[in-house]
Image (cartoon, rainbow, N blue to C red):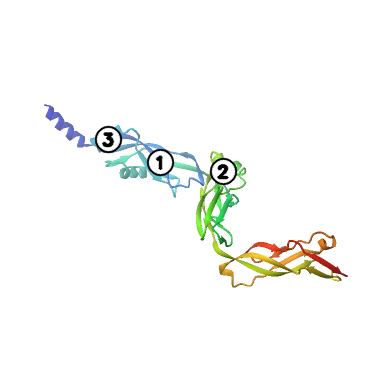
Amino acid sequence: MGLTIIVWLGVSMTETDSYTLPVRVEMTGYDTLRYAVVRADTAVTLRIECNGYNALLHSIRSERPTLRVDMSTRQAVAGSEICEIARHQLMGLRNASTDKDSLRLILAERSQRTYRPLLDDVEFAFAEQYGLYGEPSVSPAEVILYGPASDLQKIDELRIEATTIDGISESGSYRLRLQPEWENYADVHPSVKEVDVYVPTETYVEREYKVPIQVVDADNDVELHLYPEVATLHVWVAQRDLEHMPEFEVTIDYADVVAHRPLTPRLTKFPTYLRPRSLEPAEVQCVVIR
C-alpha cells in the first residue's frame, strides 16, 4: 500500500498543472543618474503551468522570484512580454499568463550642473632633475552632478582630494578621487567619483644666461646708466628644449628711479618651457643724466 502511494505521488508530481505565482519585477537599463523614479510597477501575479516538482520549488523559496526587465528604450512593457520573460528566467515554466495589460515605469529627469575638477589640493613632488613640463590635464575634464536644482546651487566647486604624489620621474596618469561633496545631499549623484590626472614630466638641466637690464617708462630726454647693466639669470631647462634660443626681459621701473626707491631687477618675460631659479644682482644703481 505504501509503495503504491509513493508511486502515485511521483506520477502526480510529474504532471503539468496550473498554479498562481506572485513575482517581483526589477526594472533595469535606464539611466539612474539622469533620471529619478516617480513610480514603477514592481510586482505582478502570474498564472503558470509547470509540474508539481517545480511548483513545490517555487513555493518553498524564502523570497518571491524576481524578473529583470530591460527598460533602456521604453517606459512600459506589455503583460504578454512579462510572461515570455518569466518563461526564460524562471525554472520549469511551460506557460505563463497574467491579467495585467502592461507594467509601467515613470521617470523624472534630474537637474544637472557641470564642474571642472580643481587640482588645488594636489601636490606633485618630482625626483631630482625632473619637473613638470606643461600643465597637468584631468580626464574627464568635466564632471556632472545630478540632483535637485536647489541642492546643486549649494555646490560651487568640485575638488580632487588632497594628496601628494612623490618621486615623479616620468610622464604618467594617476587615478585620484574627487572630494565627495554630493554625499552631503540625499539625492545628488556624480557622473564619476574618480578622475585621471596626466602629469607631463621632463628631465631638466641648469643653465645660466646674461640678460641686459632695461628701464621701462623712462623719459626720452634723459640718459640712463645702470650699474651693473647685465643681470645673471639661473634657470632649469628641459633637455628637449636645449637647442632653443630663449628670449628674456629683465626690467626696473623708471618711477622707482625718480622716487629714489631701491632698484630691484624683475624677470618680466621668459619662455614657458623654462623654470626660473634666481636672478642676480638683487639691486642695481642708476645714474640719470639730463
Q: Which residue is mark 3?
A: 57
Give the image location of residue 284, x and y in percent: 77, 64
Q: Nearer the viewer, residue 38 or 139?
A: 139
Split into 4 quadrants, where in the image is the N terminus? top left
- Mark 3, Cα crowd under 10 Å, few <14 / some 14-19 / many 20+, is few
93 is higher (above) or lower (below) than 127:
above
Q: Which residue is mark 2?
A: 181
Q: Which comes before the other along the chain, label 3 or label 1?
A: 1
Q: Secondary structure at mark 3?
A: helix
Which residue does the image show at 69% across and 68% down from the upper left? 248
Residue type at the position of mark 2: Glu
117 left or right of 50 in image:
right
- Mark 2, Cα crowd under 10 Å, few <14 / some 14-19 / many 20+, is some
Q: Which comes before the other along the chain, label 1 or label 2?
A: 1
171 left or right of 157 in image:
left
Q: CA distance from mark 1 to mark 2?
A: 30 Å
Q: Which residue is mark 1?
A: 26
Q: Secondary structure at mark 2?
A: helix
Residue type at the position of mark 3: Leu
